Image (spheres, rainbow, N blue to C red):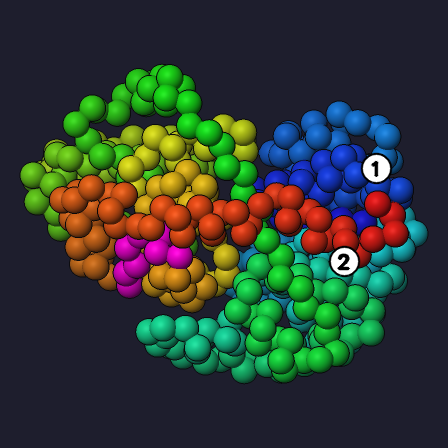
Amino acid sequence: MLFDLALGGHHGNYIQHLVERAYQQGFRGAIDIVVLPQFADIHQDTVAAIDRNQDVPIDLVPISAAEATSLGSRHSGLSRALRNVREWQIFCKYAKDLQTTHALIMYLDTCELPLAMGMQSPCPFSGIYFRPTFHYKMFENYCPDRHDKLQYWRERLTFSRISNNPQLQTMFCLDPFAVKAIASQHHTTKIVHLADPVQPYPAMPSDLATLKTELGIEAHRRVFLLFGGLDERKGIYQLLEAIQLLSSELCDRLCLLLVGGTDPARQATIHQKIAVIRQTLPLQAIEHYDFIPEADVPPYFQLADVILAPYQRHVGMSGILLLAAAAGKPVLSSDYGLMGELARRYQLGLVVDSTKPTEIARALATFLSVSPPTLSNPSQMKLFAEQNSIELYASTIFKQLFPDLL
């Protein structure tokens, strides 16, 4: 069973790559995919991949609408804890009902509290651990705040209980630095580095020209792309504040391309802030508030000159860095945590304290004043993308969990 009660972003892609691998390799088993009721509407590419081939019995199993409603939200600490416990209860119910022999929990972080509380699973399980932070202290320029320090001790306490769970077979982790730290401290857990899958796509100049025309991008401007869920976590408000600090001459060279979903209230706020900027600066801003299917994503990265990733103290991996590397485009990245470490090590672009609009503005000015490719290392970017191939991601999971069924 693949279990994932989240939507958007990588969640559909991760499942789709495993489905396609199962078909390609003639997987000699059956797979149930337990998801939210809205999954089929949002991740149509994944559903199409399941439907393309029936040689392997793979079933999409949505939980009930009542169960989905009972989950609540993840907005606050208490509601997040309650949701995580409820998710575990739903996981156990479906694992029992489906007579699951092994479960891969696609977002193991949501199970930290239930497992630390000693809740049992009906079957052996593995999981993908996205957000370890206890090793961030070894990264360059790491300055923990009060929240970071509390998180460090919370992780230490919960992880020791999780790692000793006899039902946990394999823990996959996208953070290679965390894998080394966990392996050295917790010998009871089998921890394996997992590639964060990205698919390089060849640039099609004619298609890019068409997309630029459709978007109305002015020819003399450099395109700065902010892609994905356009919310506070992405640093959208710090970015807009930084743009206000630029000169008119620099703003006249800038096209801000916003592509991704957000709720109506945030959309209205972003639109209003952009309107205020336009009153005094010659900024071109293109707002495209919509979910983009995976197959349609690469052209946006290929037409951009710079990829924006001013995340606000983001924990864990970022698919945006990988999409930028696969397209060979430099990034303006947060310097915090794993994102900052990867951007520095692979020379992906400029790294700044993205909580400070003045630093973002300084980086924007640099990108607008020099040729963007000179601010990154193409060979290192290519290596970074190659180390996170879809093939490596899917083969790692199947070889670790089901080598005898391929």
Residue 272 seen in this snapshot: no
Q: Vertical placement of 404 versus 210: above or below?
A: below
Q: Give the CA separation, mark 1 to mark 2.
A: 17 Å
- The residue shown at (46%, 29%) is 202
Q: Vertical placement of 194 versus 44: above or below?
A: below
Horizontal side of residue 9 vs 92, given as left or right: left
Q: Vertical placement of 79 versus 186: above or below?
A: above
The residue wearing badge 1 is 26
- The residue shown at (75%, 61%) is 126
Sort mark 2 into few (<14), some (14-19) or many (20+) by Cα contacts within 10 Å.
some
* Residue 347 falls inside the magenta stretch: yes
Q: Amino acid at mark 1?
A: Gly
Quarter-of-image position of residue 53: top right
Sequence order check, earlier mark of 1 and 2: 1
The residue wearing badge 2 is 400
Which residue is at the front of the view, 193 or 243? 193
**Residue 321 coordinates in the image, percent (x, y):** 43, 49
Quadrant that contains the C terminus? top right
Boundaries of the magenta span:
346-353
Quarter-of-image position of residue 228: top left
Q: Amino acid at mark 2?
A: Gln
Quarter-of-image position of residue 29: top right
Sort mark 1 into few (<14), some (14-19) or many (20+) by Cα contacts within 10 Å.
few
